[in-house]
Amino acid sequence: MGKKSLLLVALIAGFATLFIAAGIYAGTSVPDVVKMENKAYEKHKKSIVAFSHKKHVEEYKAGCGECHHDKNNKPLDNLKEGDEVQNCIECHKKAGYITGKAAKGLSKEQKLEYHANAIHANCKGCHKKFNKEKGLKSKDKGAAPTTCTKCHPKTKK
Ligand code: HEC
Ligand code: HEC
Ligand code: HEC
Ligand code: HEC
């Protein structure tokens, strides 16, 4: 490695540290399969979901704006690869999933403050719509997953 590239590496590392230190959860690139293991959780109760970001865009033809939106919930339809994208946790700030008794009496907006509730609403919302349109039940082959273990696989004990 030449001196110049070493300097570049140092610079990039420096910037990366800066961003992490500032707690900015945003990025411009995304792996083909995202391991959904948000660092804001102390501990995950369920197994980690492998989210096929690339497949959703390329094979399932989901537009960026179907999942990414701005601070006013306006869909970011015109995102391009390389654009800065904020993580869901930036706005759906509470690391957790609120359901059942604990969620009783909360408004839709209050529930959406919880990260997993917002994620579930987005993922399952589209999956349910897709299955309905195709006349598929969640257990059918080719159905988009709507039940817990289809996304959070059972782990071997
Ligand atoms: C089906 C839903 C969905 C679609 C469609 C989608 N994304 Fe994503 N994207 C996600 C999720 C979920 C994450 C992970 C974010 C998180 O964990 O908060 C993500 C992460 C990203 C990241 C990384 C952000 C970071 O901080 O690491 C980028 C960049 C990105 N998406 C860009 C795009 C672009 C550009 C498009 C359209 C071509 C697109 N996405 C379409 C759901 C989607
Ligand atoms: C810049 C802030 C911001 C980011 C980042 C963000 N959201 Fe939201 N989201 C909002 C706001 C504001 C609303 C409107 C409701 C509310 O006030 O909570 C909303 C609403 C939603 C809704 C309800 C949609 C509806 O119209 O009923 C879902 C589902 C959702 N977000 C999922 C996500 C997911 C998944 C991600 C990451 C891929 C994400 N959000 C990233 C701000 C954000
Ligand atoms: C805009 C619609 C849409 C959204 C939003 C969406 N999906 Fe999907 N998803 C699909 C479709 C369509 C399929 C494929 C069904 C088939 O043809 O097999 C699918 C399939 C899947 C599968 C099984 C196949 C694979 O590619 O792994 C998983 C797991 C999955 N989605 C996870 C997620 C998660 C996690 C989210 C939220 C972060 C999400 N999806 C959001 C449309 C969507
Ligand atoms: C479409 C896929 C999908 C389905 C179906 C789904 N989840 Fe999730 N769930 C996710 C994703 C993605 C996250 C976000 C994890 C992260 O980013 O760290 C999540 C987060 C969670 C969390 C918070 C993180 C943790 O592990 O403590 C809980 C709890 C949870 N889900 C429970 C459930 C339960 C219970 C069901 C069934 C009623 C369910 N999920 C169905 C995709 C799914």
Image (cartoon, rainbow, N blue to C red):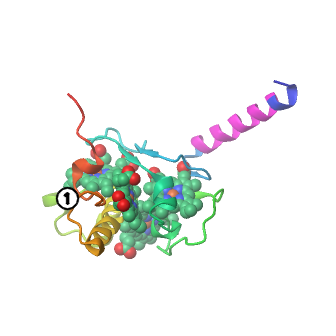
Q: Residue at x 34, y 42 (%)?
A: 48
For the C terminus, the quadrant is: top left
Q: Residue at x 52, y 66 (%)?
A: 64
Q: In the image, is 9 to the left or to the right of 88?
A: right
Q: Residue at x 30, y 63 (%)?
A: 124
Closest to the observer: 2 or 74? 2
CB of mark 1 near ligand 4 (< 8 Å): yes
Q: Is residue 106 above or below residue 1?
A: below
x and y, in percent, of residue 38 in the image: 42, 45
Image-quadrant location for residue 155 = top left
Q: Is disc 1 placed on a helix, strand or loop? A: loop
Kindly tell me whether residue 52 is visible in this rendering: yes
Q: Is residue 154 above or below residue 57?
A: above
Closest to the observer: 141 or 103? 141
x and y, in percent, of residue 54 in the image: 51, 54
Q: Main secondary structure of the magenta part?
A: helix
Q: In the image, is 64 to the left or to the right of 96?
A: right
| Tag 1: amino acid | Thr
Q: Give the magenta range.
A: 6-21
